[in-house]
Image (cartoon, grey):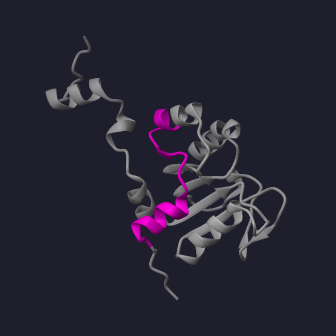
Amino acid sequence: MARRGPGQSIVEHERDRVAPASLLSVRTARQILEESVTIAVVGASRYPDKAAHAVPEQMLRHGWRVIPVNPYTDELWGQRAYPLLAEIPEPVDLVNVFRPGADAAEVVRQAVAIGARAVWLQQGIVSPEARKIADEAGIDYVEDRCIAVARASAGLTRNVTS
């Protein structure tokens, strides 16, 4: 049986014993969107007929700062694109992933490295390894869910200032 740490209450000790710290502060998908301002989109597409183009564009139209991450273009939606998350010169709140599940774990490692608070894998993308990495790092994680559908369902729009 684990011993209580110095200055740790019985309640804190039991809470820590039952669940890892990352599970104690998990935000809902709605809270993640409400509290995020800047979204980096890994796998953002240059092609308007793809979800990886239309979905981030919708988030941009609804007031989020959207930074495309795509090594094959310099700009999308009037926003500068970066080849890697590590090259984005500003803080990122949320990393939205449009890459296959096999690539997700590496993207989550990169998101952790840049200090992102959450990772969101788009609808159809799942990765137990990516989830584990996010949980161990204590960052919020959503998978197999469309960020634009979640935004619309919750009726969320960021305040846009001119």
Tell me what residue is drawn at x 53 percent, y 56 percent: 94
Outermost residue toward the left in this view: 10
Tell me what residue is drawn at x 40 percent, y 59 percent: 30
Q: State yes or no: residue 7 in magenta.
A: no
On the rendered image, what quadrant is the N terminus found in?
top left
Outermost residue toward the right in this view: 72
Q: Residue 56 appears at what percent x and percent y?
A: 63, 66
Tell me what residue is drawn at x 79 percent, y 65 percent: 46
The foreground one among 136 and 90 is 136
Outermost residue toward the top in this view: 1
Q: Horizontally, is 34 left or right of 113 in the view?
A: left
Q: Residue 147 appears at what percent x and percent y?
A: 53, 59
The foreground one among 100 and 33 is 100
Q: Residue 36 appears at what percent x and percent y?
A: 47, 62
Outermost residue toward the bottom in this view: 162
Label tally = 0
Q: Quadrant of residue 126?
A: top right
For residue 21, above or below residue 93: above
Q: Residue 16 appears at what percent x and percent y?
A: 28, 28
Tell me what residue is drawn at x 37 percent, y 45 percent: 26
Q: State yes or no: residue 147 in magenta.
A: yes
For residue 62, above or below residue 40: below
Q: Horizontally, is 79 left or right of 3 in the view?
A: right
Q: Horizontally, is 9 left or right of 35 in the view?
A: left
Q: Which range is magenta?
A: 134-156
